Image: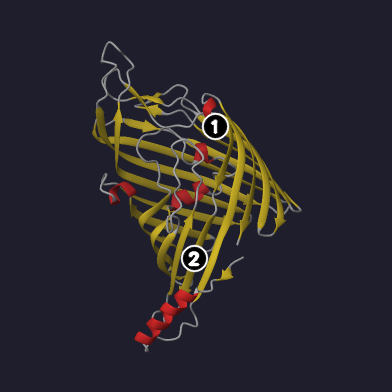
Amino acid sequence: MNKIFKPSIIAMAVSSVALTAFPTVAEETDAKYDVYGIIALQAHYRDYENSPSLTGFQTNNESRIGFRGSKQFQNFGPKFIWQIEGGYVDPSYSDHTASGGFGERDTFVGFEDFDSFGQFRLGRVLTPLYEVVDWPGANPGLGDVWDWGGLIGGAKFQDRSSNTVRWDSPEWGGLTLDVAYGRTKAAATGSDEGWWQGAAAHYKVGPIQFDAAYEINRNTAESFQDGTLDPDAHDPSTKDTFNRIWDNNTYLIGVQGWFENGISFFAQYRIQDAKVTEGVDNGREEKQNAMTSGLMYNTGDWQFKVGYTKNFELEVNGEKVADSADDIISAQAMYFVDPSAVLYVRARDVTMGGNTVDSGNAGMTYDRWKSDSFNEVSVGVEYYF
């Protein structure tokens, strides 16, 4: 439910000065400006398995607001589009920081004409693969494993990426395509020379949609310090820093369905591989596959949903790393208090495997980041405008 954005008195004053300075500018009667967003707050109680200091009540604030518009230029056929979006994510957990600055979410300029070429955008947008990872794959509450979880080295995919150019096709008999290319955040700040490219295809026939996506990430830098697996091989007090470069490939296939009896579903499977191309343990190969699924039932103003996701065990040079798998089972009941607002209750069981891997230095290991296992019960509200 978008509302027309009304410029402030200051903005109107600036506009009047601009029009006075450039009297040949045409009156922008066909320009559109919208304000949109979501007020989203979740309150939950978590019981951590190995981190009692983190157990307790927490909140998760994902409210966000954006401005978007379009303009049909007088002497150019495609429509000009733009968007600036910011949001606030509450730093509820250890090592998390607030990250909701203006423009930190989808922020771009572009052109569109869905009667011909489709849409081009330049700026900060979701990658084609991540768009289906995020929705429907990570809901309800499956993101800890399906989204940012896992143990594979390098970068299995980007999510919302700056320095991106993306093309979305028009629909061709139920088929749509998305193609994008970009530099990574680390490359933009000079930390490495990383870049990525990806594509997705979606084909809808009746109530069923088939999805396929692929993303490559190249030149991802990693720095780490060894722990000690074999005290006889190395001095446990040694804390040298080691470096290497990764290349990653990620493939996704999925299916979604929506039926008139209120039932809908989704299922996705992801294949991921990574290889060290430079630095410590050059030639090292890792693989880790993952899956996610969900079943939903709508009846009246109620929606009931269950989901399950799993990261399978990591493989390093063909050998499985024991106890490295993760999974989540989640159930949610949602009530539509308004066409634009919901209340919900959710319960999750999040089981995380080990996070220690062989570093590639003889007899040495190190830990990659992974959340602790926990159980959670939460309630939340979301209002869209």
Residue in front for this viewpoint, 46 or 173:
46
Q: Residue furthest left?
A: 279
Query: Which quarter of the figure has residue 232?
Result: top left
Quarter of the image with the C terminus in it: bottom right
Q: Is residue 371 above or below residue 198?
A: above
Quarter of the image with the N terminus in it: bottom right
Which marked residue is nearer to the observer: mark 2 or mark 1? 2
Residue 75 in view: no
Residue 236 in view: yes
Q: Tell me where residue 219 appears, x and y as whole percent.
A: 28, 43
Q: Amino acid at mark 2?
A: Phe
Q: Is residue 120 above or below residue 370?
A: below
Q: Secondary structure at mark 2?
A: strand
Q: Within 10 angstroms of label 2, few (less than 14), some, or many (20 or more) residues?
A: some
Q: Secondary structure at mark 1?
A: strand
Marks 1 and 2: in contact by CB < 8 Å? no
Residue at the (35%, 55%) spot, across then down? 181
- Residue 327: which disc? 1
Q: CA distance from mark 2 to mark 1?
A: 37 Å
- Residue 138: which disc? none
Q: Tell me where residue 347 appears, x and y as whole percent.
A: 65, 36
Query: Which quarter of the figure has residue 357?
Result: top left
Residue at the (46%, 82%) spot, across then down? 28
Total numbered labels = 2
* Residue bearing mark 2: 67
